[in-house]
Amino acid sequence: MRVASLDPQPATVDTLLQASVRMVEDERSRGASTDTKVGQLVGFAGVILSIDVALGSGAFEHSVSPHRSEVFVAFFLVSLLALVIAAYVAIRGVLLPKKTLALRPQDLDRLAGAELVLADSVKLKHMLIRTYGRELVAERRRNDRRLSVANRASLLLTVGVIAVAAEGATLTVEHSSHLCSAGHAVDAQSFKH
Protein backbone atom coordinates (compact mmCIF):
# COMPACT_ATOMS: atom_id res chain seq x y z
CA MET A 1 0.00 0.00 0.00
CA ARG A 2 1.39 3.33 -1.04
CA VAL A 3 1.16 6.29 1.36
CA ALA A 4 0.69 9.77 -0.13
CA SER A 5 3.45 12.24 0.47
CA LEU A 6 2.75 14.94 3.06
CA ASP A 7 4.82 17.44 1.11
CA PRO A 8 2.70 20.04 -0.67
CA GLN A 9 2.55 19.58 -4.40
CA PRO A 10 3.26 22.91 -6.19
CA ALA A 11 0.76 22.21 -9.00
CA THR A 12 -1.97 21.38 -6.48
CA VAL A 13 -1.23 24.52 -4.46
CA ASP A 14 -1.38 26.63 -7.65
CA THR A 15 -4.74 25.09 -8.60
CA LEU A 16 -6.16 25.67 -5.11
CA LEU A 17 -4.98 29.28 -5.10
CA GLN A 18 -6.54 29.96 -8.51
CA ALA A 19 -9.79 28.32 -7.40
CA SER A 20 -9.80 30.38 -4.18
CA VAL A 21 -9.30 33.62 -6.11
CA ARG A 22 -12.12 32.73 -8.55
CA MET A 23 -14.54 31.86 -5.74
CA VAL A 24 -13.90 35.16 -3.95
CA GLU A 25 -14.29 37.08 -7.23
CA ASP A 26 -17.58 35.25 -7.93
CA GLU A 27 -18.87 36.11 -4.48
CA ARG A 28 -17.90 39.77 -4.91
CA SER A 29 -19.64 39.77 -8.29
CA ARG A 30 -22.74 38.39 -6.58
CA GLY A 31 -22.57 41.26 -4.09
CA ALA A 32 -22.18 43.83 -6.87
CA SER A 33 -25.20 42.36 -8.65
CA THR A 34 -27.26 42.69 -5.48
CA ASP A 35 -26.12 46.31 -5.13
CA THR A 36 -27.23 47.06 -8.70
CA LYS A 37 -30.65 45.48 -8.23
CA VAL A 38 -31.21 47.21 -4.91
CA GLY A 39 -30.14 50.54 -6.41
CA GLN A 40 -32.82 50.10 -9.08
CA LEU A 41 -35.36 49.16 -6.41
CA VAL A 42 -34.59 52.34 -4.45
CA GLY A 43 -34.87 54.44 -7.62
CA PHE A 44 -38.23 52.86 -8.48
CA ALA A 45 -39.52 53.39 -4.93
CA GLY A 46 -38.45 57.04 -5.14
CA VAL A 47 -40.24 57.61 -8.45
CA ILE A 48 -43.45 55.93 -7.24
CA LEU A 49 -43.26 57.87 -3.97
CA SER A 50 -42.83 61.20 -5.78
CA ILE A 51 -45.72 60.54 -8.13
CA ASP A 52 -47.92 59.29 -5.31
CA VAL A 53 -47.28 62.36 -3.17
CA ALA A 54 -47.88 64.72 -6.10
CA LEU A 55 -51.10 63.09 -7.25
CA GLY A 56 -52.29 62.04 -3.80
CA SER A 57 -52.14 65.52 -2.34
CA GLY A 58 -54.37 66.79 -5.15
CA ALA A 59 -56.86 64.00 -4.52
CA PHE A 60 -57.42 65.22 -0.96
CA GLU A 61 -58.71 68.54 -2.28
CA HIS A 62 -61.15 66.98 -4.75
CA SER A 63 -62.61 64.22 -2.62
CA VAL A 64 -66.40 64.02 -2.69
CA SER A 65 -67.31 61.45 -0.04
CA PRO A 66 -65.84 61.66 3.47
CA HIS A 67 -66.15 57.87 3.93
CA ARG A 68 -64.25 57.08 0.75
CA SER A 69 -61.72 59.78 1.62
CA GLU A 70 -60.87 57.87 4.80
CA VAL A 71 -60.23 54.76 2.73
CA PHE A 72 -58.07 56.76 0.32
CA VAL A 73 -56.13 58.33 3.21
CA ALA A 74 -55.49 54.89 4.72
CA PHE A 75 -54.13 53.54 1.42
CA PHE A 76 -52.15 56.75 0.89
CA LEU A 77 -50.49 56.47 4.32
CA VAL A 78 -49.78 52.76 3.87
CA SER A 79 -48.16 53.42 0.48
CA LEU A 80 -46.06 56.31 1.82
CA LEU A 81 -44.85 54.32 4.81
CA ALA A 82 -44.13 51.17 2.83
CA LEU A 83 -42.22 53.02 0.09
CA VAL A 84 -40.19 55.15 2.50
CA ILE A 85 -39.34 52.18 4.71
CA ALA A 86 -38.44 50.07 1.63
CA ALA A 87 -36.00 52.74 0.46
CA TYR A 88 -34.54 53.16 3.96
CA VAL A 89 -34.10 49.40 4.49
CA ALA A 90 -32.47 49.01 1.08
CA ILE A 91 -30.10 51.93 1.53
CA ARG A 92 -29.21 51.20 5.14
CA GLY A 93 -28.96 47.44 4.82
CA VAL A 94 -27.40 47.06 1.38
CA LEU A 95 -26.16 50.21 -0.33
CA LEU A 96 -24.16 51.86 2.44
CA PRO A 97 -20.46 51.04 2.07
CA LYS A 98 -19.33 48.06 4.10
CA LYS A 99 -15.91 47.27 5.48
CA THR A 100 -14.14 44.62 3.48
CA LEU A 101 -10.54 43.56 3.57
CA ALA A 102 -9.25 40.45 1.84
CA LEU A 103 -6.15 40.42 4.02
CA ARG A 104 -6.30 40.92 7.75
CA PRO A 105 -3.87 43.47 9.23
CA GLN A 106 -1.75 40.69 10.73
CA ASP A 107 -1.57 39.02 7.28
CA LEU A 108 -0.34 42.27 5.78
CA ASP A 109 2.29 42.55 8.50
CA ARG A 110 3.39 38.99 7.84
CA LEU A 111 3.65 39.66 4.09
CA ALA A 112 6.14 42.43 4.73
CA GLY A 113 8.09 40.37 7.26
CA ALA A 114 11.26 38.47 6.49
CA GLU A 115 9.58 35.14 7.29
CA LEU A 116 7.39 35.26 4.17
CA VAL A 117 9.75 37.23 1.97
CA LEU A 118 12.26 34.44 2.45
CA ALA A 119 9.66 31.64 2.40
CA ASP A 120 9.20 29.39 -0.56
CA SER A 121 6.31 30.08 -2.92
CA VAL A 122 4.31 27.06 -1.73
CA LYS A 123 4.21 28.37 1.85
CA LEU A 124 3.21 31.84 0.66
CA LYS A 125 0.48 30.46 -1.58
CA HIS A 126 -0.79 28.31 1.29
CA MET A 127 -1.15 31.42 3.44
CA LEU A 128 -3.01 33.18 0.60
CA ILE A 129 -5.35 30.21 0.17
CA ARG A 130 -6.27 30.39 3.88
CA THR A 131 -6.74 34.15 3.60
CA TYR A 132 -9.00 33.83 0.56
CA GLY A 133 -10.92 31.09 2.33
CA ARG A 134 -11.65 33.41 5.27
CA GLU A 135 -12.61 36.20 2.86
CA LEU A 136 -14.93 33.89 0.93
CA VAL A 137 -16.78 32.90 4.09
CA ALA A 138 -17.07 36.52 5.25
CA GLU A 139 -18.16 37.77 1.82
CA ARG A 140 -20.78 35.04 1.50
CA ARG A 141 -22.21 35.89 4.94
CA ARG A 142 -22.36 39.58 4.00
CA ASN A 143 -24.02 38.81 0.68
CA ASP A 144 -26.56 36.44 2.23
CA ARG A 145 -27.47 39.06 4.83
CA ARG A 146 -27.70 41.80 2.18
CA LEU A 147 -29.88 39.59 -0.01
CA SER A 148 -32.19 38.95 2.94
CA VAL A 149 -32.47 42.72 3.51
CA ALA A 150 -33.08 43.26 -0.22
CA ASN A 151 -35.92 40.72 -0.11
CA ARG A 152 -37.53 42.59 2.79
CA ALA A 153 -37.19 45.88 0.90
CA SER A 154 -38.78 44.25 -2.18
CA LEU A 155 -41.69 43.04 -0.08
CA LEU A 156 -42.22 46.56 1.33
CA LEU A 157 -42.02 48.01 -2.18
CA THR A 158 -44.67 45.53 -3.32
CA VAL A 159 -46.94 46.57 -0.44
CA GLY A 160 -46.39 50.22 -1.38
CA VAL A 161 -47.24 49.66 -5.04
CA ILE A 162 -50.36 47.66 -4.14
CA ALA A 163 -51.45 50.47 -1.81
CA VAL A 164 -50.91 53.01 -4.62
CA ALA A 165 -53.06 50.84 -6.90
CA ALA A 166 -55.73 50.69 -4.16
CA GLU A 167 -55.60 54.50 -3.91
CA GLY A 168 -56.28 54.69 -7.63
CA ALA A 169 -59.14 52.22 -7.39
CA THR A 170 -60.64 54.17 -4.48
CA LEU A 171 -60.48 57.42 -6.43
CA THR A 172 -61.96 55.75 -9.52
CA VAL A 173 -64.89 54.32 -7.55
CA GLU A 174 -65.43 57.65 -5.80
CA HIS A 175 -65.31 59.60 -9.06
CA SER A 176 -67.63 57.12 -10.83
CA SER A 177 -70.13 57.25 -7.96
CA HIS A 178 -70.07 61.03 -8.04
CA LEU A 179 -70.67 61.09 -11.80
CA CYS A 180 -73.52 58.59 -11.49
CA SER A 181 -75.11 60.64 -8.68
CA ALA A 182 -74.77 63.82 -10.69
CA GLY A 183 -76.26 62.08 -13.73
CA HIS A 184 -79.28 60.86 -11.76
CA ALA A 185 -79.83 64.36 -10.37
CA VAL A 186 -79.80 65.82 -13.89
CA ASP A 187 -82.23 63.11 -15.10
CA ALA A 188 -84.61 63.76 -12.20
CA GLN A 189 -84.62 67.52 -12.89
CA SER A 190 -85.26 67.08 -16.60
CA PHE A 191 -88.14 64.66 -15.79
CA LYS A 192 -89.84 67.33 -13.61
CA HIS A 193 -89.78 69.95 -16.41
Image: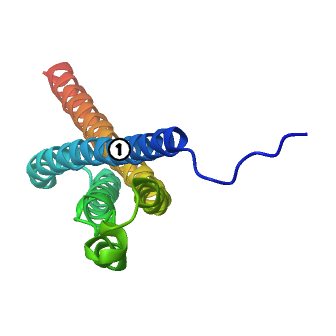
Closer to us: 91 or 68? 91
> Residue 23 in the image: x percent, y percent?
44, 43
User: Which residue corresponds to mark 1?
Assistant: 25
> Residue 84 in the image: x percent, y percent?
25, 61
Closer to us: 184 or 78? 78
Query: Position of 155 compared to 109: left or right?
Result: right
Q: What coloring was used for the rendering?
A: rainbow
Q: Residue at x 16, y 26 (%)?
A: 186
Placement of 73 over or under 35, stated as above or below: below
> Which of the 4 image quarters holds residue 40?
top left
**Quarter of the image where the C terminus is located:** top left
Placement of 34 over or under 82, stated as above or below: above
> Which of the 4 image quarters holds residue 76?
bottom left
Q: Residue at x 25, y 40 (%)?
A: 171
**Quarter of the image where the N terminus is located:** top right
> Residue 125 in the image: x percent, y percent?
42, 54
Q: Residue at x 26, y 64 (%)?
A: 88
Placement of 10 over or under 61, stated as above or below: above
Helix, strand or loop for disc 1: helix
**Extreme-right residue of the structure:** 1
Q: Amino acid at mark 1?
A: Glu
